[in-house]
Image (cartoon, grey):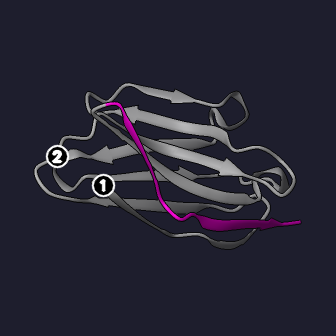
Amino acid sequence: QVQLVESGGGLVQAGGSLRLSCAASGSGFRITVMGWYRQAPGKQRELVAVITSGGSTNYADSVKGRFTISRDNARNTVYLQMNSLEREDTAVYFCYANRYDMDYWGKGTLVTVSS
C-alpha cells in the first residue's frame, strides 16, 4: 500500500509561482511513476505532469514551459514547480503514483489563481 500526502497549495495571483510537494510512504516499495493531475470545477481530472523513476517526464501541453516536475527517489517525493500561473490553472491538484501497475492517489491540494 502507498500513501500520498500533498502540500504547497494555496492562493496566488496570476503570474505568480507555487511549489507543490508530495511524499509517498509505505514499506519496501519501488514506485515507478509519480506525478500530478488536476481537476477544475465542473471538469474532468486531467494529467498535468508525470515523471518516471529514471527521470523521464511528460507534460500537458497547457503547462509546458511553465511547470517543472522533479523527483527525489531516495525520499519518494515528487515536486511540481508552477510558474507564470494563470487563472485557468485553478484546480485541485492530486498527487499520483503507480507501483506494480496499481494506481494511488492523494487527497488533493487546492490551487487558486486570482486575477
Q: Which residues are magenta?
A: 101-115
* Helix, strand or loop: magenta stretch: strand
Residue at 47% in and 35% down: 50
Percent across and percent down for residue 89 are 75, 52
Q: Which mark is residue 29?
A: 2
Classify 10 Å Cα crowding around label 1: few (below 14), some (14-19), many (20 and above).
some
Q: Quadrant of the N terminus?
A: bottom left
Instruction: Kindly indicate the quadrant of the structure image that contains residue 85.
Output: bottom right
Question: Which residue is identified by label 1?
Answer: 2
In the image, 17 versus 107, the foreground residue is: 107
* 108 drawn magenta: yes
| In-image side of 81 versus 39 (left or right) | left
In the image, 47 versus 64, the foreground residue is: 47
* 102 drawn magenta: yes
Q: Which mark is residue 96?
A: none
**Rendered view: 39 above or below 103:** below
Farthest residue to the left: give it.
28
Instruction: Kindly indicate the quadrant of the structure image that contains residue 48.
Output: top right
Disc 2 residue type? Phe
Residue at 30% in and 55% down: 2
**Rendered view: 58 above or below 47:** above
Percent across and percent down for residue 33 are 36, 35
| In-image side of 76 versus 48 (left or right) | left
Q: Quadrant of the C terminus?
A: bottom right
**Rendered view: 93 above or below 67:** below
Disc 1 residue type? Val
Disc 1, disc 2: CB below 8 Å?
Answer: yes
**SS at badge 1:** loop
